[in-house]
Every structure is written in C-alpha cells, then in structure tokens.
Amino acid sequence: MQRQQGTLTLVGHEGAPALQRVLEYAERNRIPYRWLDPADHAQKEEIRAPAAEGSGVKVVVRGRHVLHGPSVAEVARALGLEFAARGRDPVDLIIAGAGPAGLSAAVYGASEGLQTILFDDVAIGGQSAASSRIENFLGFPTGVSGADLAFRAELQAIKFGARVAVPRRAQKLQPSAIPGFYEVALDDSTYLLGRAVVIATGARYRKLGVPEEERFQGAGLYYAATELEARTCKGQEVVVVGGGNSAGQAAMFLASRASCVRLVYRGRDLSDTMSQYLVERLRRATNMKIETRSQVVELSGDDRLRTVKIRDGEGRVVERSVGGLFIMIGADPCTGWVKDAVQLDDRGFVLTGNDADASTSRTLSETSLPGVFAVGDVRSGSVKRVASAVGEGSVVVQAVHARLAALRQAEACKSVTL
C-alpha cells in the first residue's frame, strides 16, 4: 500500500463524484491504488497511455482491465473480491452491517463455531471507519482510528472462519419457506439463508436539507473526515457542521491540515452534546472558530463547492470561501430493508426486547421476529458509542446460541413425534 503498486490505477479529476466513490472504496477497504490527475502536468505521460486516454473517470485493474466510470461493485468484481452468495448453502448466522457491532458479532460468533456471513454495502467499519481518531475506547490510551480498529476486527473475524463480503446491500428480510430459516435478499438478486439474523446496519449521517447539497456531495461536501477528504482541502478554510463527538473529532483532525476550521452548531453550548475533553481541545486550538446558534443556509460553486453562507443567531448571513464542508448532524437508521419485517419506533430505529413484544420473554436485542436481532446504532434506545456497539455485538451471540438450541430441540421433538 505504501508503494501504491500492483492493484488499481485511478484516472480522473480531483473532486469528480465517480472518482471519489472508488477512492473511498479503495481507502476504506485497504486496497492498494495510485491516482493520476489529468490536471497534473507531471503525470500527463502516464495518462497518455492507451488504457488511460480519453475523458471521464477510468480505473485500470492490475494493469490489464480498463473500466470506464465504473460502479464500486464493478471494481470489486474486476478485482475478484465479489462475494458469490449461494442461498442453497444455509448458515447459522447472517450479519448485515460491518460496523463495530456487526464486526464484534462476527468475531464472537465465528470464534464459537457458528457458520457466519458478514456483509456491508460500503466498507468494513461502517460509520466508525470515517472517524479519524477514537480516544475514549478502552485499551487505546493514545486513540485509534476507526479504520484501523475495523481492519483489526476484520482480520479477527476472518481468522475464525467468518465469510466477509463488501460491497453488498440488503434489500429485504423475510421468513424462508424452509421452517426455522430467514432469507436476506441482496442487491444482485441473490439471497442468503440463515437460522439467525443480526441487523447491524447502523445509521447514516443526516443531510443539511439545503439546495445544491446533492450536487456538491463528494465535490467539496462530505459526511466523513478522513485523510481522503482532508487532502482535498489542505491549507484552506473548512466548515464542520454539528455538535456531537463526531463533529468535534473531525474538527480537531482537520485543524492540523486546514488553515482555519469553523465549527458551526445550532445549539447554544457545545457542552450539552459533546464530551468535555473535546470541547476543551477545540477551545484551545489556535485555528478553530466555534460558531454556536448558527447554521449553513446556502451552498454555491462551479464544478465543486466554493462558498457557503452561514446565518447566526441574530439573523446575520455571512458568506465564506471554503475548501470543504463537513456535515455531521446526527444520523438516520438504515432500516428501509426491514421496515416490513420487524417493528420500528417512530424514528425508524428497530424495536427490541419488551418494546418489540411485551407478550413474550425476549432478550434485549431480539426484535419482533424470533431469531432476528438488532445491535448497535440501528437499535432503538442504544447508546451511540463504539464501545457500546462492540459490547452489544458480543453479547448477542449468546442469544443466537439460544435460538439455535431452540431450533434443534424443536427438530428433535418433531422427529420423536414422527
């Protein structure tokens, strides 16, 4: 990876959304790549190669296959990383979502002998992989990046025999025609068959809801703050929107690369929503501007975001030239694929335990469907912290064992009756 050789060559202008998607996939899945920018005169000779000629984004795979404007799934297929789902091969445990909760469930499930499949629609690590540094996770006194934590967990899961698939998106959950099994339909029209399912699809950052937001996504407007996004705005002013720990961590990370960071927060006091250690660091940073009771109201630019307008609590609007806008204003659950299968609360998070069904005894993580569990940020009432998600993912495996034992007992009773 340090030599950037042997796997992918990406050709495209900085900020191009199609390029950004493949860059994110390669970075977050630790796939070695190099990037050639047509605007860089020093790279023109390499770009003149037949494989890289023409306009638009291109991906050269191992120096042989050329993909024009490919999707992430097409890149994965060309790399040989595509996961071939076989519904006729049932497993003990299907885990949808490879964030901290899903990874934890995969590690503990596979280590205890369960046939386990883990998949995610973007990359291993989920939302936590976008965190530049997690400093309040037990055992890492100097902090650890979300990507590093996820990579180590992935290696553990694979070591114990879990099958991992990225990118794969769940489309629907339903009981199978085979008694005791559930089917998870995937985005390529295949399906997985399992005796137990763990929903760990987490949540996605909310959008600002201002005009032009979709247009600038990946072209100056981001929902994560990693090295990939930070290098596009080095030495420039950036704006971070949000008042939680994720926003604070992003602002501190960007402060070491940007000329100035403006943290824009709608509330009156950061201490109401952010850990005190982060608030103190933000206040001590010399190139940090904290603007409370403020919000971004307008975006503008050409091929990428150039300026934002910020309205303060007095109604004054100021236009700022920016190199990047980072939005971290809470999250919405990724539960569209299970809305017809399990009970959700009024915000779309999965109800579990007695909240899902008070008429029967259920574990804390079990949904309204027996044998289907929800852990981490996607679960209604969960504590939105990495450590909590890891704990829920490990504990749910005990409930999965109980589910499998009940199925075995039911099958044994049926055999005796017959």
Image (spheres, rainbow, N blue to C red):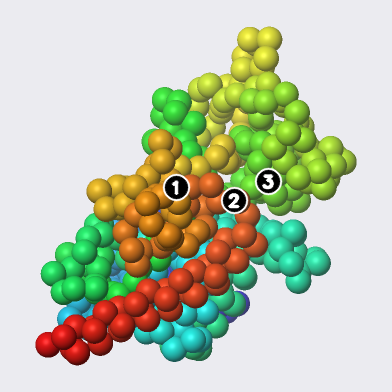
Residue drawn at point x = 22 percent, y = 60 percent? 174
> What percent of the width, then of the height, locates residue 218?
46, 46
Residue 315: quarter of image? top right
- Farthest residue to the front: give it: 417
Q: The N terminus appears in which quarter of the rendering?
A: bottom right
| Residue picked out by circle 1 | 355
Give the mark, 3 or 1, whose residue is nearer the N terminus. Answer: 3
Is 131 or 117 nearer to us in this picture? Answer: 117
Residue drawn at point x = 66 percent, y = 30 percent? 264
- Between the residue at mark 3 and the residue at mark 2, the CA separation in whole angstroms equals 10 Å
| Residue picked out by circle 3 | 245
Image side of residue 235 versus residue 193, left or right: right
In the rendered structure, find residue 384 and report the number of the disc placed on it.
Answer: 2
Q: Amino acid at mark 3?
A: Asn
Vertical relation: 4 (above or below) 40? below
Asked which secondary structure carries label 3, the reply is helix
Give the mark, 2 or 1, whose residue is nearer the N terminus. Answer: 1
Q: Amino acid at mark 1?
A: Asp
For marks 2 and 1, give the one nearer the viewer: 1
Vertical relation: 318 (above or below) 127? above
For marks 3 and 2, give the one nearer the viewer: 2
Image side of residue 344 versus residue 388, left or right: left
